[in-house]
Every structure is written in C-alpha cells, then in structure tokens.
Image: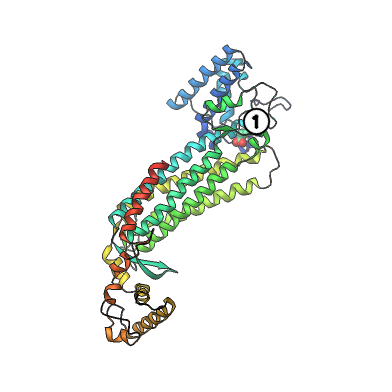
Amino acid sequence: MAKMWAGRTDGITDPIADEFNSSIRIDQRMYKEDITGSLAHAKMLKKQSIIPSGAADHIIGALAGILEDIQKGDLVIDPEAEDIHMFVEQVLTERIGDEGKMLHTARSRNDQVANDTRMYLRSASEDMQKKVGAIVEVLCETAEANKDVIMPGYTHMQRAQPVVFGQHMLAYAMMFLRDIERLQDLTKRMNRSVIGACALAGTTYDIDREYEAELLGFDQIAMNSMDAVSDRDFCLELLSALSILMMHVSRMAEELILWSSWEFRFIELSDAYTTGSSIMPQKKNPDMAELLRGKTGRVYGDLMSLLTVMKGIPLAYNKDMQEDKEPVFDALDTAGMCLDVLAPMLASMKVNAPEMYKAAQKGFINATDLADYLVKKGMPFRAAYKICGQITAACIASGEVLETLPLEAYRTYSELFEEDLYQAIDLKTAVNSRISAGGTGIKSVEAQIVWVKQQLEELL
Ligand code: ARG
C-alpha cells in the first residue's frame, strides 16, 4: 500500500525499508499523548477558523473514540504502521473520511513527536519521583528503627569512626531527595510546548500556540521553531538524572551485598529477595541487589547512546532522532523496576545490631575520640593525634584495644590521661557527642528524620 506521504515519490517502499524505518514498536506507548495532542490541535484549528468548525468537531469526536477504543482493547495498534502518529491519523481518516485529512494542517510530525515525547516524559518523571519518594520513606523508617545502632563508619573501606546505622541510611535518603529535586527541575524545562514549530520554520497559518500549549498543560511555548524540533536535551537531562539516581541505587546495592556477606553479617536480606545456588546448599545469594548494581550500567549506556546519536546532527529534524525514545523508555523502565524492588528489599532486611557493634569495637575507631580527649585537656590537636597514633600502634603490637589498655600504660604517654578517658572513648559516648548539625549523634539523627520527612512533603 502506498504511504500517506506518497506524492513526490510513489510511496512504495521495500518491506525491509519499512521495517527499518518503523518506530511503532517503541512509540506506541505514547498513543494517549499523541491523541491528546491531536485533540488540542483540532480545537486550536477550530478556534482560529483554520478548518471548518464542523470538520473539527468530527475530528474531535473521532479522536476521542479512537482513544477509548485503544484503551478498551477494541482497537489494536497495527505493528506494521510507520509510527504512532501515522497510525492514529490513518484510523481517523478511515473513520471519518476526508475531514480526517484536515487535522495535519499547520503541523508536522517533527513538532508532533517532540510534543508527544515531552508530554509522555513529564508524567513519567512524576511517576519516577513518587517511586524515589517511596525509597526515601523506607529509609526514614529504617533510620528511625536504628537510630542508636552503632556500627563502624568507613573511609577508604577502613574502619574510621563509629556512626549509627540510622545516619548511614539517612545519607542515602539525602541523595534520593536530591534525585527527586533533579527530576522536578528538568521537568520544568521539559514542560514547554513545541507544537506549532511545524517542520522547522513555523507556519503561514494564524495559529495560537499559547492556547494549544495551555490545553496540553504546558507552562510556556518554546520560542524558536528550529530549536523546538531539533533538540533532545530534555531526554538527555532525564537520562542524566536517571543515571545519577541509579548511581545512588548501585552504591546502596553494593553495600547491601557487602553487609550481607558472611564477612560482615551486618544485615540479612529477606529470603524474598535472594536466591539459592544450584550446587552449594549453604548459599543465599543477593541476586536482586547485584542486579540493581548491574542494571545501573544499562541506564548509563542509554545516556551514552543518545548523547552519541545527537552529537553530530545538523539542525533541524533528522531521522536519527527517532532513536531517542528507545533509550529513554528503557532507562525509565529499568530505573522504575529497580526502585520497585529496592523499596521492599530495604523494608524487609534484618539489621544485625550485635554484629555491627562487634565490628565497631575492634577497629580502633574511637582513636579520634581519644585524641579529642587530650585536646579538651589542653593539648594541641596535632600533638594529641601523634600520641594516640603511637598508643594505637602499641596496642596492635600487643594485641590490646584502647578500652582494655590500663591507665598506667596511658600515663606513660601523657600525664593528662585520667580514669575518665574510658568514658570518653566508649562507643556510645563517641557517637552521641557528635552533636554538630548533620552529625551522627542521636539528636541530630532524629532532627534529620524530621527534616527529610518535611522535604518529602514539600516536594511531592
Ligand atoms: N517516528 C518519527 C520519530 O520518532 C516521527 C517523526 C518523523 N518525521 C519525519 N519527518 N520523518 O522521530
């Protein structure tokens, strides 16, 4: 069958070319946006008397019917169609005849596809924000339940200073909150209407772009027609935000994997999110967490793929840009599913507080507190630091820990040491004296939980 765009050519193409050219497999998920966009376009054409009012009404009625039929499953999207835009227009013309052919006045698929994609992605961004919000909520609950559970905090993967598990969870909550902010921020720039840019240069018809934009819920219109149909930066911004979000997911997954190892035993994942080995009977593998980490690579790939597609394209529309939707949709599906798995996985994990405490005791992580003790008694920090380093080295050599080293031994290093040093280096004291804003002290952790919940309320 000849194409709807037959004219200059006879519209007869090689089936292999049709298959190659077709994007319906990918863009059919935008059917609702495409029809909503067309409804607004018909209303605008009617209001501006660009097409006869009666024809516009028939188009509007038929489009509403098409939407309903697709939603009900009465109209199946034809996989042979070139794309969703052609499919809808084709069905429209089949249903109401020549009047259907008036819809594409003062419009091109170039502005149409960009507008549809913007509409689809802005609501996908909202869904994603809610999913991230669900993670933040679980993190708050976990933080609340573990606000006094002491664990070693690490730098360079070496035990550094004692923290509470709640503090560690809240660190991720802060990151995910910023992911929501990033999504909101880019959605603002995405929410500009490009319809009316037409093929690339605007149109000779007296269209009302503002009106059409308003009908479709856009905040404003894109001010340059060539920019409007040429750029896909809004897709790239979303892909960047999703990549950063997945980087956070992946770091968290990495920690869950480490913590659930027999070496750490800080947490135990629920059986529901682990698998067994087909050969080793003792195994409980954190497959889901590993996939969260693995799928991050896939989302990064989606970003790189579109950046690469876009880098050499001259203005304005080029068919290369049809390759925009597959990576964006894939990244959305992948990140969305990851968040759906992560939330219940976190909520159901068991925290092994005694193991965390044991690990915190063995690593000299209160050495800073020992130094601070001397500083509070008047010694300059650098001098205190050096003495405590020497004490630590001696303890390691003799198999002792700071808590068990006798006072006489301490006093050979400095006369400032007294009986109260043991209180100062107690892990609970060490944690709870970190009272600075944002620190790991229990008051600070409680304040952070309140703050995160407030932020979430304001953002979503
Ligand atoms: N399926 C196309 C896309 O996704 C629609 C735009 C086609 N425009 C054109 N002039 N061939 O980019």
Position of residue 376 relative to residue 256, above or below, is below
- Secondary structure under badge 1? loop
**Picture coordinates of residue 125, whole percent (x, y):** 48, 40
Q: Which residue is mark 1?
A: 197
Q: Residue furthest right?
A: 8
The three-letter code of the residue at mark 1 reads Ala
User: What's the residue at 34%, 75% (across, down)?
Assistant: 373
Q: Nearer the viewer, residue 220 or 196?
A: 220
Quadrant that contains the C terminus: top left
Residue 459 in the image: state x and y as whole percent: 42, 42
Q: Which quadrant of the frame does ligand 1 lie within?
A: top right
Q: Between residues 443 and 263, which one lies in front from this camera angle?
A: 443
- Residue 34 sits in which quadrant? top right
Q: Establish if 11 lies above or below 332.
A: above
> Would residue 60 be visible to someone looking at this image?
yes
Residue found farthest to the front = 378
Q: Position of residue 343 (x, y in %)?
A: 36, 49
Res 150 quadrant in image:
bottom left
- Name the side, left or right, on which 198 lies relative to 391: right
Mark 1 burial class by Cα count in 10 Å: few <14, some 14-19, many 20+: many
Q: Which quadrant: the N terminus?
A: top right
Q: Residue lying furthest top in this view?
A: 54
> Can residue 14 be seen in the rendering of this structure?
no
User: Is disc 1's CB within 8 Å of ligand 1?
Assistant: no
Determine which quarter of the picture holds residue 134. Answer: top left
Q: Position of residue 235 (x, y in %)?
A: 56, 42
